[in-house]
Amino acid sequence: MGTSSADVSTPARVATTTARPRAEARWRRPLPWAAGALVVLACLGLQTQLYTGQERTVTTIFMFVALAQAWNIIGGFTGYASFGQVVFFGLGGYTTAVVMYHWQWNFWLALVVSGLLAAAFGALIGLPLLRLKGHYFAIATLGVAEGMREVVTNLPDLTGGGAGISIPTVGPGAPTAYLGNDGFYILFLLLAALAVLSAGLVSRSKFGLALRAINQDEAAAGSMGINTTLAKVAAFTLSGFLVGLVGASYAFQQVTIFPERLFDVDITVLMVVMVVIGGSGTVLGPLLGAVALQYLSEYLRQHYTNLHTFILGAIIIVAVILLPQGVVNYAREAARTRDFSLLRNVRRYRL
Amino acid sequence: MSEGGAAPETPVLDVRGLGRRFGGLQALADVSFTVPRGRTLGIIGPNGAGKSTFINLVTGHIRPTSGRVLIDGRDMTGARPWSVARAGVARTFQIVKPFRGMTVRENVAVGILYGPEGTGIMSHALTAADEVLEQVGLGALADRPPGELTVADARRLELAKALALRPRLLLLDEVMAGLRHREIEPSLALISSLKKQGMTIIAVEHVMKAILAISDEVLVLHRGRVLTSGEPDAVLSDPRVIEAYLGHRYVKRQRAVSRDA
């Protein structure tokens, strides 16, 4: 053994035995689960304290938590930055609207079918798309989303075309009665919880390690025995499933939907920004990113009506420059290295 | 390196007429040899001789344009990398490829989880990863992120990741590259101990001292073709090898080594 490494390893080897249980415990920490359950209960308690406008705002926050976390599975863990996840949102929404409008399906059945259809579509387009990397993958997914909007617009008999489609929500013609603000609050809370739970389970699993390995180096991941194609498609499918569920719920909440509203690139961009600012590839990051950004957006909208997108944009730019790896990743690194300087952080992540 | 019928059992690796063409460039052509169980083959050759292409063809990172690859008698020609890995072939990369964002221990656990004996139980994999890390002398650094490792330790992690697959064939792509003189010794000792355990190894290497120390046989690649193969000493003293491949560089290096001494 070289002298330099021998110097390090002799005193450090003593520490190994104490370090080991801690490292393994990382995989079965009960604390995050307990904290998650508490937050869900707290959100249910919070509901009774909110008036209608606030309740809607918080419902939207839940929606973006679910969307950001779903994007995180493919974009964060796996490192495939999709700019077309909104395709699953639109697909889920339109599936629900169409089956409820044309065939009077129950919303809950429509919700599940929408999620499954979005997942199936994810597997189908994932196979060719996930052969692409980086910018090419981003552009291709963007193209798929834009293309799907055109397809939906040009099927007026089924989707109502550009004029949109309205889900029957009242009277005897309604397959499922409108859930109302209280109902949608709980529905989106459950979707957010499901997405965070999925990301949490993925993060700690064998599957999650495979995704992170693929994120770092696909050739190396393959030579470690990971079926990279299968893992990538599975991640894309899971993400599509979650986004599809959210889209279906959003369509029911909005009642009337248009292609421009459901296949809105802004929704994809928000998912990406929330994950990047919060910390991609972490479970906590997208959660914090979605809550912070959506809350901030709403606050600015109420207090600076004319300037709100301008200010929000400026804040996002500053955040991305100072914390390119996201809040959670920055905090972890800073806590480990005891270096909290933002300036040094910018330098470290400079291209 | 056919042993003239000395090995009755199926060779671990059997390549027949293996070749790869990149457009107009024939990177590798008509490479045939077998590696019997428990033997170590050293592959040498100048830059661009096709050494890394050869490893990539065996591991499935590149598909061959001609020839066949048999692993333990099974035809794995053009199989995907994960199939080859699960068939028991592990490799290191010339440019180390640690999985950043995981600890050293988790890096190794990936191979245990997805390797031929793949387990689904994370705690078992992490415990097994610690054993592999002890074996290569990285036990004390298991909790570190790989970005903090020295060059020598990063190479050892690369080896640990390969060993995590419990391979029957280990392909080492320049594991000594970038190491200082005194760092080479522990690496050589490690490879020797793997040999003693009966591991079949193919080592692509630039460091002559390393090749001589570990190889049972040496194969020389030159411009994508097998120039010669045989006993290490015989090959290295072969005038064709010295002239056509090692050339004046090796001679100069030898002179420099003796001057330093």
Image (cartoon, rainbow, N blue to C red):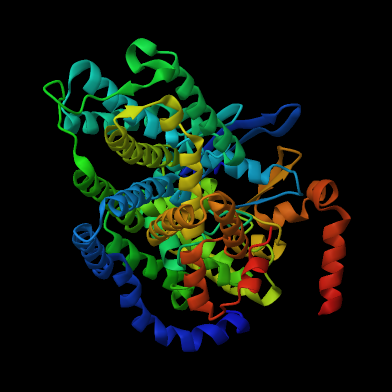
Q: Residue pushed farthest left?
A: A172
Relative to the observer, which residue lies in front, B95 or B226? B95
Residue B117 makes an appearance in the image: no
Left or right: A46, with A282 as reference point: left
In the rendered view, tell whether residue A227 sits above or below residue B113. above
Relative to the observer, which residue lies in front, B25 or B100? B100
Q: Residue pushed farthest top?
A: A157
Which residue is at a point 65% across and 73% down the rendered structure image?
Answer: A344
The quadrant the N terminus of chain B occupies is top right
Which residue is at a point 27% across and 46% down the rendered structure image?
Answer: A188
Q: Position of residue B231 (x, y in %)?
A: 65, 53
In the rendered view, tell whether residue B247 sits above or below residue B221. below
Left or right: B208, with A252 as reference point: right
Left or right: A223, with A159 as reference point: right
Q: Position of residue A26 (x, y in %)?
A: 32, 69
The quadrant the C terminus of chain B occupies is bottom right
Please identify the quarter of the rendering in which residue A348 is found: bottom right
